[in-house]
Amino acid sequence: MAPGEAIPGEREAVGLARGLGRLFAALGQTSLTEFTVKNGRRTDLIALDSKGRFTIVEIKTSLADFRSDTKWTEYLEFCDYYFFSVPEHFPREVLPDHHGLIVADRFDATILRPSPEAMMNAAWRKAQTLRFAATAARRLHELTDPGI
């Protein structure tokens, strides 16, 4: 594998994030990948709806990926809705059933189980909304003027 080349699980996660982005766009929401929340953890995908509610999606590409990662619980206080997203071949029965579930591929995604709502702290919501907007604006600027 060449330096800087994504490993297979990472490539699959990028594809799932693309499908998730399409799902949230179809739902009228704006999403960002690799967004850092207040505690310093970087989410796989976060979406913001028209009412200012946040959804965080944790992407898992394999059983080993799920079993080796316990930090996902540290995202829960930074969203109103929380989902796991997995590819079709993932053994879904191992996932906690008290969170939402999305099956995705690089072209689309389908919500199999909705997430219960858990209202996030209002002060954190305001700060996170501002960071979300600033992150989106910075990323757009980097696309139109790389290297600045």
Image (cartoon, rainbow, N blue to C red):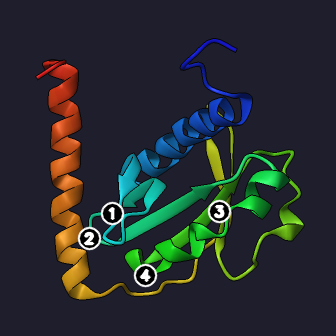
Identity of the amino acid at label 2? Gly
Kindly report the distance in space between the C-alpha atoms of the residues bearing marks 1 and 4: 17 Å
Image x and y of residue 5, in percent = 59, 19
The answer to whether 98 appears left or right of 54 in the picture is right
- Does dot 3 land on a helix, a strand or a loop? strand
- Does dot 1 land on a helix, a strand or a loop? loop
- Mark 1 and mark 2 in contact (Cβ < 8 Å)? yes
Kindly report the distance in space between the C-alpha atoms of the residues bearing marks 2 and 3: 21 Å
Q: Earlier in the sequence, mark 1 or mark 4?
A: 1
Residue that mark 1 sits on: 49
Q: Earlier in the sequence, mark 3 or mark 4?
A: 4
Instruction: Establish if 7 lies above or below 85.
Output: above
- Does dot 4 land on a helix, a strand or a loop? helix
The residue mark sitting in front, 3 or 4, is: 4
Identity of the amino acid at label 3? Phe
The answer to whether 42 appears left or right of 11 in the picture is left
Kindly report the distance in space between the C-alpha atoms of the residues bearing marks 2 and 1: 5 Å
Kindly report the distance in space between the C-alpha atoms of the residues bearing marks 4 and 2: 15 Å
Q: Is residue 2 visible?
A: yes
Residue that mark 2 sits on: 52
Residue that mark 4 sits on: 77
